[in-house]
Amino acid sequence: MAYRDTAQSATQGTAWSNKAATSHQRAQSCPIRVQPPEIHSDSEALVALTMAMLIVILGVALRSMAYQSAHKWLRQRSFDRIIALRAQATRAFATALALTLGACSIFPGYKAPTLDIPPTWRDEQAQSPTWPTKDWWQGFGSPELDSLIAQAESGNLDLAAAVARVREADAQTRIAGAALLPAIDLGGAASRIRQPSISTLGTGASGKTYTLYDAQISASYEIDFWGKNKAFLEAAKATAQASRYSEATIALSTVTSVAIAYFQILELRDQIAVTEAQLGAAESILKALEAQEAAGTVTALDVALQETTVATLQAEIPPLQQMLRQFIDALAILVGKPPESVDINSGTLDSSRVVRTSRWPRRS
C-alpha cells in the first residue's frame, strides 16, 4: 500500500512538472503572463515509506536474534555431549590401565616358618588315648546334664560374644577385600525440555516438547602398587581365623565348666547326704551313751567325746550347703539364666556313668 501511494505521488509530481514546463513555454511565446501551479511534497507518502522500512528492519533484527539464540543453545548442547564423551573415554582408559597394572605388587608372599617337630612325645604310651568326640558329655548318660549343656550353648553370654566377634572379623575381612575390587558407580537423569517455535516476527506460542534421558556409568580401581590392600586382607583373614579358634576355645571351656559345676553339685549333695547320715548316727550313739552314763556303765568322758563328734558333724554341714549354693549360682551364670530358675534337685554321682571310670567298682 505504501509503495502504491509512493508511485502515485511520483506520477502526480511528473505530471505537474510537465504542465509547468508547457506553461513556461507558452508564457515565453505569448505576451500574456500565466502563473504556474504550486507543487506541494507528499508527507503522507514519506511517513508510510519510513514506517515500512522500520518494520522490515525490525523483523530482520528479531529473526537474527532468534537465530543466534537457537544457534547458541545447539552449540552448548553439542559442547556438553563432546565433554561427556571425552569423560567416558577417559574413564574407560583409566579402567583399562588399572586392570592392566592391578597385578603389579611388590608385596612378598608369606611363607610359614618350618619347625622341627618330633613325631612322638618322649613319654608317650604305646597306645595313645582316644580323642573325645564332639558330644563327649553324652557318655555320662545324664539327660539333665545334656539339657544344661544345650542351654549353655544357646544362652551363654561369653559364647554369644565370641560368636559375635567371629561375625565381626568376617565382616572386616570382606571390607578389607573390597579395596582389591574395582568400584562401579551408576547414575541416571531425566529432564523435560520445551523448545519454542521461531518465526520472523518473534517467538510463537506453539513449540516442541521432548524428554532427555542421561545415563552414566563410571568405574575406578586403586592400584595396589605397594601391596597395602593385600596385606590388610591377609591380616583380616588371620584375625578371623584367630576369632574362630577363640570361639571354639570358649565353647569348649563353657561346656567343660557346665559339666564340672554339675558334677560338683552332685558331689556336694552326696557329701551333705553322707554327713547328715553320720550326724544322725552320732546323735543316736550320743543318746545311747547318755543312757549308759545314767546307768553307770560309761564315764562322762565318753559322753563328752561323742558330743564333740556330733558338734563337729553339725559344723560341717553349713559350709557344704553354702558351697552347693555357690555352684548352683555358677551353673546358672553358665547357662545364662537367673540362679532362682536353676536347681538340681535330683541325681547323684552314683546314678551316672562317671563312677565306672574310677578305680572302685560300682555299688549294686
Image (tube, rainbow, N blue to C red):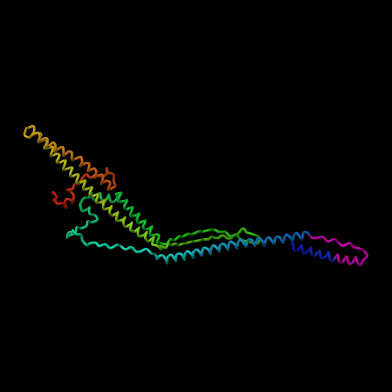
Image quadrant for the N terminus? bottom right
User: Magenta region: which residues?
Assistant: 19-42
Does 293 sit left or right of 58 as displayed?
A: left
> In the image, residue 305 lies at what x, y percent?
12, 37
Residue 69 among those drawn in magenta:
no
User: Residue at position x 21%, y 50% from top?
Assistant: 142
Question: Nearest the camera: 215 or 119?
Answer: 119
In the image, is residue 347 above or below residue 209? above
Please give the count of numbered marks on the rendered protein.
Answer: 0
In the image, is residue 44 above or below residue 318? below
User: Residue at position x 77%, y 64% from top?
Assistant: 7
Question: Nearest the camera: 159 or 4?
Answer: 159
Does 354 sit left or right of 76 as displayed?
A: left
Question: Nearest the camera: 4 or 133?
Answer: 133
Residue 28 among those drawn in magenta:
yes
> In the image, residue 249 lies at what x, y percent?
27, 54
Question: Nearest the camera: 182 or 118?
Answer: 118
> In the image, residue 124 lies at what x, y percent?
18, 59
User: Residue at position x 42%, y 63% from top?
Assistant: 223
Residue 346: image quadrant is top left
Residue lying at the far left in this picture: please name it: 297
Residue 15: image quadrant is bottom right
